[in-house]
Amino acid sequence: MKMEILGIDIGGSGIKGAPVDVDKGEMVAERHRIDTPQPSTPDAVGNVVAELARYFDWTGLIGCTFPAIIKNGVTLSAANVDQSWIGTQAEKLLRKKTGCPLILLNDADAAGMAEMEFGAGKGHKGVVIILTLGTGIGSAVFVNGALLANSELGHLEFDGREAEKWTSDKVRKDKDLSWKKWGERINAYLNHVEFLLSPDLFILGGGVSKNFDKFSPYLHTQTKIVPAQLLNDAGIIGAALAARNIK
């Protein structure tokens, strides 16, 4: 009997979800997306999460991602969402809103879990670092398959800069950087991360990973670099995978 869990991915511009077959790592229905309310307060976002659960007529387990540091169900930061999330008992709030058993985790960690189980990281041991290149830079770090939760490698500083403010996909678009120029920035950042953590594999995700071939010629590290495979579905799938462990 296949196990299905509802995965929900909360972002700064949209909140999307779909039921996931967690044995296969595949969505079993077309994902549904609702614009993130503005202002994106906990109460307003919670209402949208509940609306998504109702859309799928869902009463079972829910896994939910959020762009923040999350410890014991509490959001300790807030990236691209309302600052009132900081210090909120977010997991408890979303459980109450949906009436369902629910787990909340960092969005990049969720995407990383999906890539490790069903994508580019499948079967890889040692230190694997997944970096999602988007509005900022999200990160997920795995050591022999175990997640080091809430890493924030996009906020590393090097050459006096915060990494994501120099190398994110948003910066590429805003500055109209060529693939070569942007690739060189990514390369400098990856070399810095490599020096600090000595990974065995880099996986580059986010929407821009579909253009991997355009900037990969400018990436030169000792560590192998591959594109993510699950693209924009990784957050939903990873959220559902995390919910398998709900007590």
Image (tube, rainbow, N blue to C red):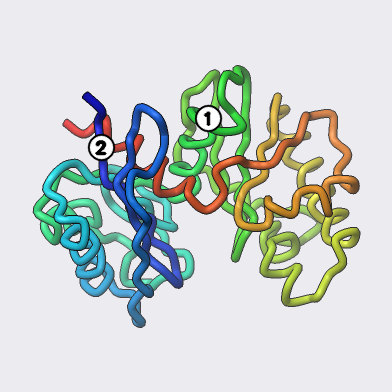
Relative vertical location of residue 148 with respect to residue 227 in this rendering, above or below: above
Q: Nearer the viewer, residue 111 or 105?
A: 111
- The answer to whether one can see residue 104 in this image is no
Helix, strand or loop status at disc 1: helix
Count up the numbered dots. Answer: 2
The residue that appears at 36% across and 49% down in the rendered structure is: 70
- Res 116 label: 1
Helix, strand or loop status at disc 2: strand
The residue that appears at 48% across and 32% down in the rendered structure is: 148
- The answer to whether one can see residue 31 in this image is yes
Q: Quadrant of residue 5?
A: top left
Q: Is residue 206 left or right of residue 172?
A: left
Residue 47 % position (x, y): 20, 69
Q: Residues within 10 Å of mark 2 (few under 14, many from 20)?
A: many
Relative vertical location of residue 47 with respect to residue 179 in this rendering, above or below: below
Quadrant that contains the C terminus? top left
Quadrant that contains the N terminus? top left
**Front of the two marks 2 and 1:** 2
The residue pinned by badge 2 equals: 4
Extreme residue toward the bottom, this view: 38
> Between marks 2 and 1, how big is the CA–CA gap?
19 Å
Q: Is residue 100 left or right of residue 89?
A: left
- Res 188 label: none
Residue 50 % position (x, y): 18, 63
Residue type at tag 1: Met
Residue type at tag 2: Glu
Relative vertical location of residue 12 with respect to residue 127 in this rendering, above or below: below
Q: Residues within 10 Å of mark 1 (few under 14, many from 20)?
A: many
